[in-house]
Image (cartoon, coloured by chain):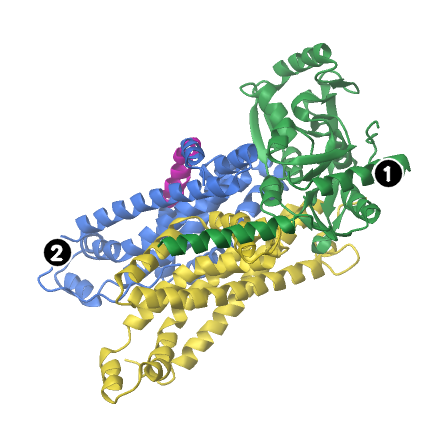
Chain colours: A blue, B green, C yellow
Amino acid sequence: MDFAFMGQAFMTLIAGIPLTLQLAFSSVALGAVLALVLAAMRQSGILPLDWFARGYVFVFRGTPLLVQVFLIYYGLGQFRPTLQEWGLWTFFREPYWCALTALTLNTAAYASEIIRGGLQSVPHGQVEAARACGMPRGLLFRRIVFPIAVRQALPGYSNEIILMVKATSLASIITMMEVTGLAHKLISQTFRAIEVFVVAGAIYLLLNFAVTRIVMAVEHWLSPHLRPPPTPIATPPEAAHV
Amino acid sequence: MRILKVIGLALVGSALAMGSAQAQKKWETVKIATEGAYAPWNFSGPGGKLDGFEVELANDLCRRMGVKCEVVAQDWDGIIPALQAGKYDAIMAGMNVTPKRMEAIQFSRVYAASPHGFGVLKSSPLAKLAGTGEVYHLERDAAQAQTTIDAWKPLLKGKTIGVQGSTVNSAFIEKHFKGVAEIREYKTTEQHDLDLAAGRLDAIFAGHSALAATAEKPEFKDMTIAGAGVSGDVLGAGVAVGLRKGDTELKAMFDKAINEAIADGGLAKLTAKWFTVKMTPQT
Amino acid sequence: MQPLGFFEIMGFGPRGWGAAMLLAALMTVGVSVCGFLAGAVIGTGVAAMKLSRSRIARVVADTYTTVLRGVPDLLVIYLFYFGGSLALSAVGRWFGADGFIGLPAFATGAIAIGVVSGAYQAEVLRGAYQALSRGELEAARAVGMSRGLMFRRIVAPQVLRYAIPGLGNVWQLVLKESALISVTGLVELLRQSQIGSGSTRQPFTFFLTAAALYLVITTVSTYAFQWAETRSMRGVRRA
């Protein structure tokens, strides 16, 4: 291991961090909106909407993200004339938008399930109690359902954000020069694959460490009633979110 | 602790000794890597079956060297690191000899050479790039080459050019068009072909041999080679077998086999079978 | 020459890619199964370390899962691909073997998947172990069961029962991750689709078919895991 070289590699690769973070956070934010819509469709009780959301989640969770990226980027390229007619080509022409689309559609499928889990975790008694007090539906959602659901869903969502930071590395395959893309370029100039990949891995680890800390801080902030616990509450072990 | 150190040193020493004793390895099988996505040099059929000029040439050279040959596919951007990591013993993947690559690996003698140039859609304004049909050597015809490149620059200003990453083509475009045009690097030439056809790229820069082969396909009939062909300088000194630096014996074997193939016309026959442009290097 | 239609490309005729795609799908399943099993072995070991009383073992195991879950799988696979045979060759040289020892793409892929999924499986198994009822373990100890017997009769069957849903999730992950193995040159489903789209210039057709085949595989395995879950829960009283 040549540490001087790894230092240089680090300096080269950090130039890709802004794009990596931009892709990760834009897709998580857009994906969250879409996920809310999907979760609402699942909970709506209207069969066609429910089926659509189910199908969506099934397809996007059942296929590899890399296949989705290829399908959206190269696959849609096959239909340029049609897309041009619809005025969508300027959008799908850019690798950035294709990568963002694929990441967003993918994360929305996973996130909608996390949100649904959060919504279902709201104790029925609390909703009934609120109704008994005569709370209108909007207020009930804002004051009771939403805060509880968000707290419940947050650990799962933190995993999802980490997965998205990791997933942005696939954008390098469609010419995006984020951290992994720059790593490939550096390897092509230096032919030193292992050192460069180790440095790239370390960068992702740092990013994810930061993400974990931020989410933990948010979680702490959102649960004042849980700290300091008078008696330690035995929480069931968090099942690995995958 | 001292004893442990001594034992450790002894072990290392004996391992080194054994290593050097067996350094004169007899080559019985040679594993050769190719990309499998660079028609007509090398490409993959259904099931990943490799075919193309270099696959046939590899088998022919192995026959001449009296060794068993195994040709494997390897992604282009890892092809040199994986050679160094010992995944295989040689590279035959349309790889040009360049000083930069010589720092990492060594090359056999050159077995093919073709100029490089732009591929564009026939309908594009770039189809009128200067010098179509001409071939300039960047060092021998330096003046003409420079005039031609300068004439290309205004036309390509602000356009998007696709190249395969880690290639002589990307080196050339970086050197002459960085800041002029937007450069996008692809994993394979097949991918930038698709993106040229899809209209995401205004031009691609690749070997004439590969561009000509692509333009012959029915799906790519509106693609054409535009502008003069260029060679030399960063574009390299021709295509050769890439080998690890230590394997001098293997290099000698490949050199001898390629010279034989040039002398008895075997190479010319393969070239004529796979390429529409003249490829055999001068002896 | 007319560009081929969907059924001609994906058919089984002389110019069809149907057989090749199905074979590649089998390869995907094969490399995933091997990777999953390798991950089960690694995951069990790591879970045991996480639960052990040794501080060092816990730190090592936690570092392992943290690193593996924080680094993109694509990078892990690349590292294994390039680093694996260098490390093997170094080890080989100690034993006097000369030159390079290569790992076939299949083995590299399966091991890389195993190492990544091992980190996830360790978490699942640890969670399942902690869900065991303390009382049962105490009871087993009280009747004088040896540790081995206790593991075999009490711990292993129940951990497996609780872990099935989580392991099902990891399996789905492994299946999708196997697509990344395409970068090592192993001709699995995604690699085959790339080859096909490069050769026929019809990327949409190939990637859509690949997506459909992945869906078939994930659906079948979802049902398999559901069946296993129901079966393993036969003896459990539902609340």
Q: Which residue is mark 1?
A: B260
Q: Quadrant of the C terminus of chain B?
A: top right
At x 57%, y 47%, the residue is A71
Position of residue B61 measured from the top left corner of the image (x, y, whole percent): 81, 44
Q: Which residues are magenta?
A: A12-30
Residue pushed farthest right?
A: B264
Kind of residue sitting beneath label 2: His
Residue at position x 18%, y 65% in the image: A128
- Camera-side residue: C75 or B263? B263
- Vertical relation: C151 (above or below) B216: below
Furthest residue to the left? A230
Q: Quadrant of residue A239?
A: bottom left
The spot of residue B271 in percent (x, y) is: 84, 37
Sort mark 2 into few (<14), some (14-19) or many (20+) by Cα contacts within 10 Å: few
Crowdedness of circle 1 by 10 Å Cα count: few (<14), some, many (20+)? some
Q: Position of residue B166 (x, y in %)?
A: 60, 34
Q: Main secondary structure of the magenta part?
A: helix
> Can the viewer see residue B201 in this picture?
no
* Residue found farthest to the bottom: C143
Q: Amino acid at mark 1?
A: Glu
In this rendering, does residue B219 appear at all?
yes
Give whichever of A29, B191 is nearer the camera. B191
The chain holding disc 1 is: B
Q: Quadrant of residue A82?
A: top right
Instruction: Read off the residue under disc 2.
Output: A225
A229 lies above or below A205: below
Residue A13 part of the magenta-drawn span: yes
Which of labels 2 and 1 is toward the front? 1
Q: Pick the quarter of the image with the N terminus of chain B.
A: bottom left
Q: How many marks?
A: 2
Q: Which chain letter goes with mark 2?
A: A
